[in-house]
Each structure stands twice: as C-alpha cells, then as structure tokens.
Image (cartoon, rainbow, N blue to C red):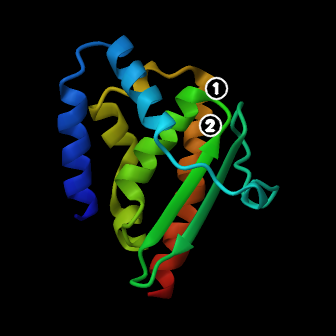
Amino acid sequence: MNLHQRATDLEEEFSFLDDWEDRYAHIIDMGKAIAPLAEYERNEQTRVRGCASQVWMVIETGATEQLIIRAESDAMIVSGLIAILIRLLSGASGAEITDFDVKAFLERIGVSGTLSAQRSNGLASMLQRIKQIAAASAEAD
C-alpha cells in the first residue's frame, strides 16, 4: 500500500469520529498500540528536540529504500500522533514523503487544529526530522 492509499484509509477512519473527544480517544488508543523502542534506542541521538514530552525516533532505510519509522513518547497523546505518522509514512520512499503535504493531511483529518501550541511544536519537530531524513534519502536514490 502506498502513502496515498494509507492517507485515504486514515481519512476514512477519522471521518467516522464526530468530535474532538472521539478523535482524541482514538489517537490515544492508536498510541497504545505502537511497539516500544528498545532501551538502547532511547538516547540523545534519537531524541527529538522541540517536544514538551520525551520523544525518541529511529528512522532506518529498508531493503527497498523505503524509510522505516519507529518512535516512542512518554505522553499518551504524543504516542498517538507518532502512531499516525508511522501508519502514514513508514514504508514510503524518501521522495514520497518529501512530496506529501503531511500538515494539510493532519488538518483534513481534524488533528492539527485542536492541538495545543506545545503539541503543535512537538509535531512540527517530529515532521522536520522525518522530512530531513526523507530528503537525504531521496537525494541518494
């Protein structure tokens, strides 16, 4: 499944959630389902700066040049935001990620407009890290 198909699936999933409380609960549930990082992966090199909570992100290149994103946070809502980013972007190529407007997507599904300033900054920091690595990967292709 490519990035646009995953985006469509997520949009459909979120379209059934009528209000922010339902979205919030769903995002938290999504976050509970992500696999934790190994203890050694939670370090200063993988820590995402700019987040109010602790966030660690590991991005690796798969066998077919697709980026594999794994991440973890100590905050429930941030874990849910990570889960959305992983479902959307992990497995996509650097070029696909670079070309996709994640911010517009998050607005379409009703996530970004309801986040606090701190959460928005943290989300922007996570996206910046992903986009930087995706751009470097796309250049290497």
Residue at horizontal 68 percent and vertical 34 percent from the top: 74
Q: Position of residue 21 (x, y in %)?
A: 38, 12
Q: Tell which residue pokes out farthest to the bottom in this image.
A: 141
Q: Residue at x 41, y 23 (%)?
A: 113
The residue wearing badge 1 is 118
How many residues crowd around disc 2 within 10 Å: few (fewer than 14), some, or many (20 or more)? Answer: many
Residue 122 tag number: 2
Secondary structure category for the residue under label 1:
helix
- Quarter of the rendering containing residue 46: bottom right
Residue in the picture at 31% in, 41% down: 105
Q: Badge 1 local density, few (<14 within 10 Å), some, or many (20+)?
A: few
Rendered view: 70 above or below 113:
below
Residue type of the residue flagged with mark 1: Gln
At a point 59% along the width and 51% down the height, the residue shown is 71
Could you say where residue 92 lies in the image, as x and y percent from the top left?
A: 36, 67
Q: Would you say the residues marked 2 and 1 are in contact, meaning their CB atoms lie under 8 Å apart? A: yes
Quarter of the image that includes the C terminus: bottom left
User: What percent of the width, then of the height, locates residue 52?
Assistant: 71, 31
Disc 2 to disc 1, how far (Cα)? 6 Å
Q: Quadrant of the N terminus?
A: bottom left
Q: Residue 17, relative to residue 52: is it above or below?
A: above
Q: Amino acid at mark 2?
A: Gly
